[in-house]
Image (spheres, rainbow, N blue to C red):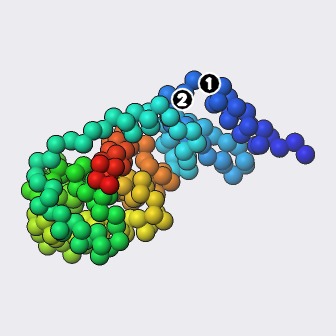
Amino acid sequence: MFNLKVYVFAFIVSLSLSLPIASADIYKYEDDEGVLHFTDAPTDHRFKIFIRDIKKDKQFRTHFRLAKCVGNPTEFEPIINSCALEFGVDKSLVKAVIHAESGYDPNAVSAKGASGLMQLMPNTARSLKVGNSFDPAENIRGGVRYLRFLLDTFGGDEALALAAYNAGLSRVAKYGGIPPYEETRNYVAKVLEYRKSYQ
């Protein structure tokens, strides 16, 4: 029996290999009738990533240099080590998140209202029992605890955990992966690149 779906899939894969590197991510979903739909601008949560923009991903991975810190990273080393050990999160990942979020400025406040070293949003801080987001020990402990929760939620997938840290759990769930937001993709790539410098 002729399998149209397999044929279409094979055709698209062969076509993608024969063309120059994609200039955008391609998403697909299969509807109830077995019809495959493709787009580079998903507007429906059923679309899942199909072909990555390899050129853009490479740029993300190689573009970031370790930005200057506002604060002094060594000042917070004991707190980071203690919280990383307590929650079983790699301390180099914690350091990279702090570096990307606040540049080690314990008094940092974002335009959206996130505050402290790990830039906790007020509702997130409350749910994590963080009474004072500007207290480095409380902020780091809350942030690392939240990272642990996100890592557990996504089966240890650090990229998805970081995407949720930046864009929120609901958006990662909606898109079934890293949301197609430049800020979030940029953030994930930056943190993972920073992490290498702390390993």
User: Would residue 54 appear left or right of 166 to someone viewing this image?
Assistant: right
Horizontal and vertical percent position of residue 103 = 17, 49
Q: Quadrant of residue 63?
A: top left
Q: Residue furthest top?
A: 20
Residue behind mark 2: 22
Q: Is residue 146 left or right of residue 36?
A: left
User: Residue 178, relative to residue 51: is it above or below?
Assistant: below
Residue that numbered label 1 is attached to = 19
Image quarter for residue 91? bottom left
Residue sitting at x 44%, y 67%: 153
Q: Few, some or many C-alpha atoms within 10 Å of disc 1 (few <14, some 14-19, many ≥20)? A: few
Near-viewer residue (47 or 198): 198
Disc 1 to disc 2: CB gap under 8 Å: yes
Horizontally, residue 55 falls left or right of residue 195, namely right
Amino acid type indicated by mark 2 = Ala
Position of residue 148 measured from the top left corner of the image (x, y, whole percent): 35, 68
Amino acid on which the number 1 mark rests in the picture: Leu
